[in-house]
Image (tube, grey):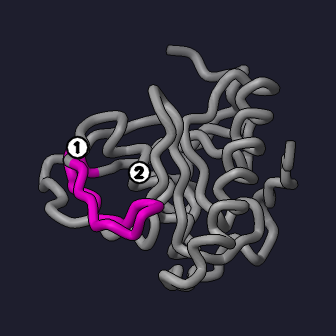
Amino acid sequence: MAVKEILVLGNPKLYNVSVPVAQDQLDHIKSVVKDLHDTMMDFRNTYGVGRAIAAPQIDVMQRLIYMYIDKPVVFINPELDQKSDEMITVWDDCMCFPDLLVQVQRHKTCRIIYRDMDWCEQKMDLQDDLSELLQHEYDHLDGILAVSRAIDSRSFALRNQLLD
């Protein structure tokens, strides 16, 4: 198992913009995907949450997202488009600050276009919590953290203190 250290809030590397993955890097990307999987599953076992992780969170500054809900999905060089005007407000969490929640607004729907592990172009329409999730992970590729998207200065809560 290759569990990697997750960069935490305050690490300046989290604010860097990631570089695209080149097709000739696919063999290398396979090992990064394994590391992302192992790291996310370890986090999930520890905290009980974790549906996706972006490569910059484990100090790999490439445009790569790994998601595992029902099955693993790898998003290479993703692009978001067709973002709805309708927004949703959510309490966002992040592996980079596991005890902190941040209230943000995200597009209710969007579409993600990406390359898969066979370098084939794929498209996925997203809505509600899946839309929010992939927007969050996509932000990591651009060096944007949820704390930067907070609705206002009162949009922060410790996970164990938030009341519904």
* Residue at the (46%, 46%) spot, across then down: 73
Residue at label 2?
Answer: 134
* Residue at the (21%, 53%) spot, across then down: 110
Point out the tag, 1 or 2, that comes first from the N-terminus. Answer: 1
Residue 155 appears anywhere in the view: no
Residue 12, label in figure: none
The N terminus, quarter of image: top right
* Magenta highlight range: 107-124
Is residue 87 found left or right of 66 in the rendered image? left
Q: Amino acid at mark 1?
A: Lys
* Residue at the (72%, 61%) spot, across then down: 31
Q: Amino acid at mark 2?
A: Leu
| Circle 1: element type | loop
Give the distance between the C-alpha atoms of the residues marked 1 and 2, in whole angstroms: 11 Å
What percent of the width, then of the height, locates residue 148?
A: 54, 63
Is residue 50 found left or right of 118 in the rendered image? right
Residue 123 lies, with reference to residue 103, above or below; the image says below
What percent of the width, then of the height, locates residue 107?
A: 25, 51
The single residue placed furthest to the top in the displayed view is 164
| Circle 2: element type | helix
Kindly report which numbered mark, 1 or 2, lies closer to the viewer in this rendering. Answer: 2
